[in-house]
Image (spheres, rainbow, N blue to C red):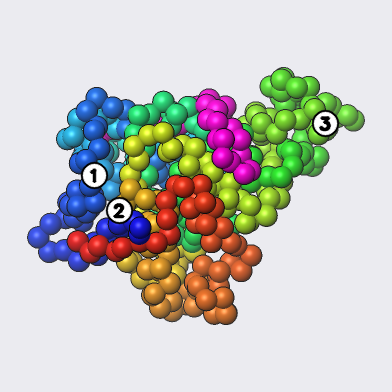
Amino acid sequence: MPSKVYFSDLRTSKKSLTDKLKNLMKAAGFETINFEGKYVAVKMHFGEPGNLAFLRPNWAEAVCSYVKALGGKPFLTDCNTLYVGGRKNGLDHLTSAFSNGFTPLQTGVHTIIADGIKGTDEAYVPLENGEYVKSAKIGRALADADIIISLSHFKGHQSTGFGGALKNIGMGGGSRAGKMEMHSASKPTVDPELCIGCGACIRCCAHDAPQIIDGKSVVDFDKCVGCGRCIGECPVDAMHAEMDECNSILGCKIAEYAYAICKDKPNFHVSIAIDISPYCDCHACNDLAVVPNIGMFASFDPVALDMACADAVNAEKPIRGSLLDEAEHVHGDHFTDIFPNTSWHSTIEHAEKLGFGTEKYELIII
């Protein structure tokens, strides 16, 4: 049976867009969830400093105020990044979130970095039917939540084709070790030009993998378990993940992580298809949108939701002068035209294989 995906466009004259979003969520069955006294994680992306395509905090306030009206205890959350930037640790991440407007004064709720200060506050979630992941390493705050809501900015992505609900939950919900597992088929490596031989990696490693040789850190891969803790500890960002997993397997791992986070909890998914940049909001800048703004989508099925958003984007003509407009249109969809080496279908197909949802959907216009 196809899943129901609810859609509203951005036309409005009497109600605000945030009120229209609440009406969409209500029509999609949001109020059938028992929120009374429950901790509700609203998983979203706070935007890398310098990026202006991320969802405004007004959208987050609308979702959280709706949850509070239904008796829930919502909080905004995301996990730290694996790469170097404004969200690499919990303190910088909060500063970045606050600078982009995600403060209690604006959203009415607290912002919690799910995997803590150094990306190591994690929970292990068994995944018996996982093909690539047997134990997902997710941010503790997400594991502690009673209900998961994804609030996603639907846009392109240089590794996964696009970023929607599955990527927002799966990749975004992984701790540093979790992101390491999804992105990399190997272990952390050291840039010798940056390394100062301070030994911070040695002090934080529980497996004695790093050692100082000729004044530089070297990782013993036979001892390393790939937790990524040293990446967060390095004061000069000399430690890094290879990012060498092929994109199709990356997509499958994202699906397994998203499923692990949501599988035993009520979950609901919202995607806003506006400012559809070709790159992820993790970039410190955002390019021209590739297609016009489309609207708001909501569903209990994140697989169907992502598929509906992808179809909606592919139905639009490219914006003149955008990266999509300049691309060769030979692949049959906009996302692969922009990034030919990506494989967004692998995420959708693998999530469906896991029983997380179906790519078949009925679009209901509200």
Q: Secondary structure at mark 2?
A: strand
Residue displayed at 24% across by 32% down = 35
Name the residue beneath numbered marker 1.
30
Q: Earlier in the sequence, mark 2 or mark 3?
A: 3
Q: Is residue 273 visible?
A: no
Please name whichever residue, 351 or 208, is drawn nearer the observer in this view of the structure.
351
- Residue 29, how many percent across, how many down? 22, 47
User: Which residue lies most toward the left here?
Assistant: 14
36 versus 27 height, above or below: above
Quadrant where the C terminus is found in the figure:
bottom left
Residue displayed at 67% across by 55% down = 246
How crowded pointer 2 is (Cα within 10 Å; few <14, some 14-19, many 20+) is rated as many
- Residue 338, how many percent across, how many down? 55, 70
Q: Does residue 135 belong to the magenta stretch?
A: yes
Decide: marks 1, 2 in contact (CB < 8 A)?
yes
Name the residue beneath numbered marker 3.
222
Range shown magenta = 108-136
Q: Amino acid at mark 1?
A: Phe
Q: Secondary structure at mark 1?
A: helix
